[in-house]
């Protein structure tokens, strides 16, 4: 395996209180943001509404479209240019249960005020509030099922529930921090973001398992060393692998974030934040939790 760092001697666990304080502070800021903003900013997928894709004969002015929508009954609509042709995607939120498709007529009527005969509707999808609530519930359940499955798998693989609990807590930490940053930066949460979170759950726990596996191997070989020493050395030994895999993935998602367009921008933002936080938690959250637990139960540091 290619090694970027050789003979690393970083005392990661010696700074565990600092890492836990940093994580706690970020989650607290996210919680304060949620309280101030009265919850997350949900997309059409969860709030209900209409998504309309329109193709114009000539490249339109997005600001003019936004003004027409604002002045003609759709102030919360979000027009987004699509890469390639003169296509614009418009999200109209806040559908009513009795007529979820009313947003289509509102959008078309608004566009006719400034682009009469200059556009065609390519597609229109409407989601009612009840469907949005069901999708929201299913998204939460999917995340919880994923965490529960990983807890069982890791506990079985390492013959100790504390490893599974620490890994799941670290992944849960990653999810909370990412969602908190979504609230702080007023980012929209939609189904693509949930897909990103589920992707990150698997990615983060994979990193954590690599570290835990090295810790388990070293504990068998170095029974006289303290647990903290073995853990520090194990993290340092896997550091090159962590930086290589996370770094390459990070470059990919950064390119996706910068050049992927508006449609997947929230997805890419979740991936960028998640890769950073997931790598951090594998080193600074999961292993310290195992150490703290074993110290409380009387084992040597």
Image (tube, helix red, strand yellow):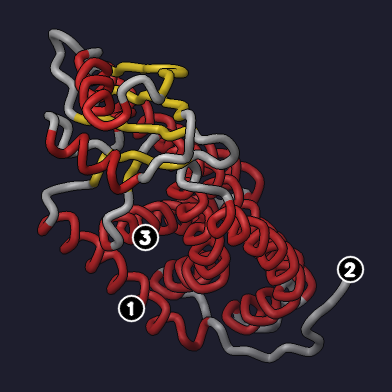
Who comes first in sequence, dot 3 or dot 1? 1
Who comes first in sequence, dot 2 or dot 1? 2
Q: Which residue is mark 1?
A: 21
Above or below 259: residue 40: above
Specify few, some or many for label 2: CA neighbours under 10 Å numbering under 14, 14-19, or 20 or more.
few
Closer to the camera, 183 or 79?
79
Which structural element holds mark 2? loop
From the top left corner, tell me how far across and down residue 171 is, in percent: 47, 53
Who comes first in sequence, dot 2 or dot 3? 2
Q: Which residue is mark 3?
A: 177
Describe residue 108's horizontal placement relative to residue 150 as left or right: left
Can residue 47 be seen here? no
From the top left corner, tell me how far across and down residue 114 is, in percent: 26, 32
Describe residue 262's horizontal placement relative to residue 92 as left or right: right
Mark 2–mark 3 CB contact (< 8 Å): no
Which residue extends farthest top? 98
Closer to the camera, 272 or 109?
109
Specify few, some or many for label 3: CA neighbours under 10 Å numbering under 14, 14-19, or 20 or more.
many
Q: Which residue is mark 2?
A: 1
Above or below 117: residue 16: below
Tell me how far mark 2 sits from mark 1, CA to CA.
34 Å
Q: Residue at x 77, y 84 (%)?
A: 5
Which structural element holds mark 1? helix
Tell me how far mark 3 sits from mark 1, CA to CA.
13 Å
Q: Residue at x 27, y 21 (%)?
A: 108
């Amino acid at each position: 395996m290619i090694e970027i760092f050789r003979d690393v001697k970083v005392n990661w666990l010696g700074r565990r209180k600092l890492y836990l304080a940093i994580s706690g502070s970020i989650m607290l800021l996210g919680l304060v943001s949620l309280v101030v903003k009265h919850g997350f900013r949900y997309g059409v997928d969860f709030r209900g509404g209409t998504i309309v894709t329109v193709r114009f004969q000539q490249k339109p002015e997005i600001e003019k479209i936004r003004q027409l929508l604002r002045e003609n009954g759709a102030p919360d609509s979000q027009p987004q240019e699509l890469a390639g042709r003169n296509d614009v995607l418009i999200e109209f939120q806040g559908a009513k249960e009795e007529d979820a498709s009313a947003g289509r007529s509102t959008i078309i009527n608004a566009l006719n005020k400034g682009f009469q005969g200059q556009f065609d509707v390519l597609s229109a999808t409407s989601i009612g509030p009840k469907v949005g609530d069901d999708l929201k519930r299913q998204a939460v359940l999917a995340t919880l099922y994923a965490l529960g499955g990983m807890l069982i798998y890791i506990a079985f693989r390492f013959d100790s529930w504390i490893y599974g609990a620490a890994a799941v807590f670290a992944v849960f930490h990653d999810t909370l921090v990412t969602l908190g940053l979504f609230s702080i930066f007023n980012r929209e949460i939609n189904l693509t973001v949930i897909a990103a979170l589920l992707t990150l759950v698997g990615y983060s726990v994979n990193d954590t398992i690599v570290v835990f596996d090295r810790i388990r191997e070293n504990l068998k070989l170095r029974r006289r060393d303290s647990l903290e020493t073995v853990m520090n050395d194990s993290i340092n030994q896997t550091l090159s692998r962590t930086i290589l895999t996370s770094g390459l993935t990070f470059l990919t998602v950064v390119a996706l974030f910068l050049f992927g367009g508006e449609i997947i921008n929230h997805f890419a933002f979740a991936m960028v934040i998640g890769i950073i936080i997931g790598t951090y938690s594998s080193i600074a959250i999961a292993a310290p939790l195992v150490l703290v637990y074993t110290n409380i139960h009387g084992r040597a540091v």
